[in-house]
Image: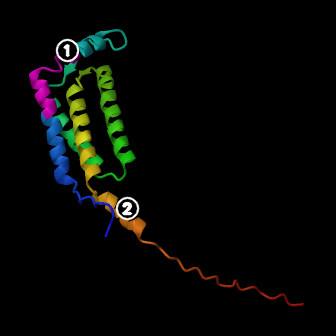
């Protein structure tokens, strides 16, 4: 009998969809309630200031931003749940956040006004949910690694003498 409790086996697709839905609904709800209006006004002032000098820009609509939020949160949840080890999951969250936050100033330079608060909130919440689920379950990628570690490969090495030609005197 084992001395510690075994984690239940987890799946990837359904928990990823649920994590993405919770993050997306949270972010869209916060947007509809107006939590991001002060940050949007501040970002708009920053982008009209010296380094960016945004004047006439294409504004990304709210519905496109909602769709982007759902896609980003689903991709982050799938990537997090389908990665082995905690450090890889942490790296996925950190790099996704850096990419998302770095996209907004790049789009401003192209003349596209996009406010990244809603996808960022959805990304952070989705990533935290997926990280918690993955820490409480044995994910398929983790169990594959454990099975490979448990199998001991015994290699039998035989040396075959190398044929040497005898020198003729």
Neighbourhood count class around disc 1 (C-alpha, 10 Å): few under 14, some 14–19, many 20 upward: few
Question: What is the chief secondary structure element of the magenta stretch?
Answer: helix
- CA distance separating discs 2 and 1: 47 Å
Determine the image quadrant of residue 142: bottom left
- Residue 14: % across, % down: 16, 52
Q: Secondary structure at mark 1?
A: helix
Within the magenta stretch, is there residue 94?
A: no
Q: Which residues are magenta?
A: 26-40
* Residue, disc 1: 38
Residue 9: mark in rendering: none
Which residue corresponds to the image point at 50% horizontal and 76% vertical from the top-left? Answer: 154
Q: Relative to 91, say whether 134 is above or below.
A: below
The quarter of the rendered structure image containing the C terminus is: bottom right
Please determine whether, in this image, residue 107 is positioned above or below residue 125. Answer: above
Is residue 62 among what the camera can see?
A: no
Residue holding disc 2: 145
Helix, strand or loop at mark 2: helix
């Amino acid at each position: 009998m084992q001395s510690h409790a075994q984690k239940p086996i987890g799946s990837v697709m359904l928990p990823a969809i649920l994590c993405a839905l919770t993050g997306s609904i949270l972010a869209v709800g916060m947007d509809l309630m107006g939590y991001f209006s002060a940050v949007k006004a501040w970002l708009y002032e920053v982008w009209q200031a010296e380094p960016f000098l945004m004047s006439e820009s294409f504004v990304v609509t709210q519905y496109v931003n909602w769709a982007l939020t759902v896609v980003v949160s689903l991709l982050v949840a799938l990537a997090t749940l389908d990665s082995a080890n905690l450090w890889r999951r942490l790296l996925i969250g950190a790099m996704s956040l850096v990419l998302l936050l770095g996209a907004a100033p790049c789009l401003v330079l192209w003349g596209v006004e996009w406010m990244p608060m809603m996808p960022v909130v959805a990304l952070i919440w989705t990533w935290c949910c997926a990280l918690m689920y993955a820490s409480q379950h044995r994910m398929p990628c983790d169990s594959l690694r454990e099975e490979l570690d448990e199998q001991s490969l015994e290699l039998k090495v035989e040396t075959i003498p190398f044929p040497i030609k005898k020198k003729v005197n």
